[in-house]
Image (spheres, coloured by chain):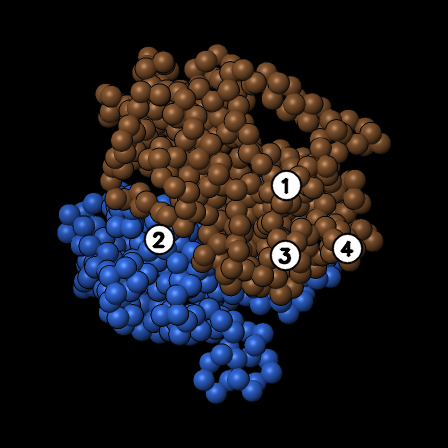
Chain colours: A blue, B brown
Amino acid sequence: MKKNLGILGILLVVFVATAIGNSNFLTAYNMFNLLERASLYGIIGIGVAFVIITGGIDLSIGSLIGLVATLLPFLVLDLSLPLAVGLIAIFALSLCVGLTHGVLITRLKLQPFVVTLCGLMIYRGIARWVVSDKTMGYGNEVFSGLKVLVGNMSQLPGMSGVSWAKHVPVAFLILLVLGVISSVFLNKTIYGRYLLALGRNEQAARFSGINTSLMIVLAYVICSLISGFGGLLFALDYGSIQPDSFGNFYELYAIAAAVLGGCSLRGGEGSIVGIILGAALMRLLMNSISMLGIDDQLEPAVIGIVILLGVIVDELVKRFAARRRAIKQAREVGA
Amino acid sequence: MSTKLSRVCGVCGIVGITCIGLILVGCSGNRTEESSQPKVAYITNGIASFWNYAERGAKDAAEEFDVNVNVQMPGTNAVEDQKRMCQDLLAQGIDGMAISPVDPDNQGDLLAEIAQRTRLITHDSDAPESDRLCYIGMNNYTAGRMCGQLVKEAMPEGGSVMIFVGRLGQANSRLRRQGMIDELMDREPDENRYDEPSAGEIKGEKYTILDTRTDGFDFGKAKAQAQDAVAKYDDLGCMVGLFVYNPPFILDAVREADKLGKIKIVAFDEDEKSLQGIKDKEIYGTVVQNPYKYGYESVRVLAGLARGDNSVIPENKILYIPARQIRNDNVDEFRAELDRLSSEASADTDNPPDAKNDASTEKSVTES
């Protein structure tokens, strides 16, 4: 948690500054929206973190989200398949995508950047081709049951009478569950430790008996499965899918959230709490820009500056800690 | 040593975080002051020069009718951006919102959310199924037929036609395209007809629609698609760009291939390059909307509603702003009109521009 203090500090400063700047910021309506957006982006951030921790990257997340979001209504509405079949198909597809990425990276030794960059183009092209660029929608009754996933918690069974439930998005609950499972997996299971170990030094991990290829494949499979699930949630939330643009740049938002949250692009480092905070900060900034009436055109610049400052502060704090450790050790040796 | 280092890092950290706070609060400095003016919002469906005229109209009306207007333009992820922008504006508390929905059929939840929390009107692209109080814009199907008439005039002997458009998900582009196709196929008017773009060539007696290419507001792709079409079809007769930025890219592609005159170009909207192309007889003509009036009328109606004046809404809840055909013979006159609008926007607000009066007087004509 200590290493997430920097990002938490920035999050709090932005939160307080926005609350002071606009009293409507703290309304239940805005908090619900903010929490929901942060949760959706947090979910795909957790997915990509598994890959980043191994020292890899996945640039195809946005296109996979676009493909999954496009295919489900195509299968269910255009091909009249049952919803369950459609859901199984999109999760099977996500699994296959992750498996293919992992196998190409570990067996053919292709660079993750290249493999997933090609994936980015391939999945986007397939999504557009399958439906001839036609806009797909989730307004049909068939999907009304699934929409609970992007509703509020009072829509869950047994929660209708709970007063606070209607102010908490279900997506937040999903994020919490996924976050806890991922955190336990990474920090408390041997496989999680393997992932972190191979991210730090793959060769050393292999020599110590870890099947690194299998673990890398597993990381890409987890990433694609979570991305596919995230894609479903995004699709249900927005309702309208433009196959040529839906999910564009989501991979960058996910990667930025992971890096902001303490993941090193060199691998071996990362915490789930940090990633959730990173995703929350990005969404909070977008909301703050709107709430504070900052020119819309400045939005990317403000986000870029804040992230850069965040990373600089984080780096300085890390250097300070390392320096202090070194001095302490030197003193101990001297003594 | 360690104390000094710790101080430096501490100061750096505090300075960094303070900077973030200052950036946020500083950028918003002049906006957070409370005002008694009604607050309304004008949401477009993308970023394009077309919308700059609408923004100007919206801001002029805001001054004239004493309201505070917030104009927002979504980027390439338009559906997501629209949702976020609308929800953020609703959270701030606004008195009315005019939106051009990207995909009215599937944005029902968002439109219902807006209608529930404030006064909702649509502009440019309608959502008749929603609880919108009014639609302001042209009849896109009729405008599409007007575009088809220009193609017929440009290529009276018949030939093949390619259509280029940003998106087909939104009702305005679908209707525009369908109107044009129906005109070229000499069909009876039917706004519910829809020829799937994936169905392949549409053959009529004299005209053949080869294909419809969409670019999702990606200008690089728009240009590449125009170039590819010129390269692919030797006997291409006419290229039609249905969104404001399409015709200039088509013109570039045809010019680069040295096929000016051989391939006719018909435009939509009033990009300066398209108008110059019409002046130079490189583009046959264009169908223009009046985005200035979209913006102006939207804010005028919202201002009236915010003050409790429901008479601003026509009986049929539709305020049509008619489209016009611009050819070589009237392009100078039209450009002069645009220049006047541009200069008036920056002129003294004590002298309301003629266009505003035009917009107000046209209301009675277009309401029918």
User: Do the residues marked 1 and 4 share a common chain?
Assistant: yes
Q: Quadrant of residue B251?
A: top left
Residue beneath the point at 55% across and 47% down: B100
Q: Judge from the rendering whether residue B144 lies leftward or rightward of residue B316; answer left or right.
A: left
Q: Position of residue B192 (x, y in %)?
A: 40, 50
Across and down, in percent, residue A88 comes to 25, 68
Give me the C-alpha separation between circle 1 and circle 3. Answer: 17 Å
Q: Which chain does the residue under circle 1 lie in?
A: B
Residue in the image at 44% along x and 19% along y: B283
User: Label 3 crowding class (10 Å Cα cut-off): few <14, some 14-19, many 20+?
Assistant: many
User: Looking at the image, which is closer to me, B318 or A117?
Assistant: B318
Check if mark 1's residue and mark 2's residue have beta carbons within 8 Å. no
The amino acid type, in three-letter code, at marker 4 is Asp
For residue B326, above or below residue A153: above
Residue under the point 52% across and 74% down? A152
Residue B359: tell me if it is visible: yes
Q: Which mark is residue B309?
A: 4
Chain letter of the residue carrying label 3: B
Q: Mark 3 belongs to which amino acid?
A: Leu
Q: Closer to the observer: label 2 or label 3?
A: 3
Query: What residue would you read off at disc 2?
Result: A66
Q: Which mark is residue B133?
A: 3
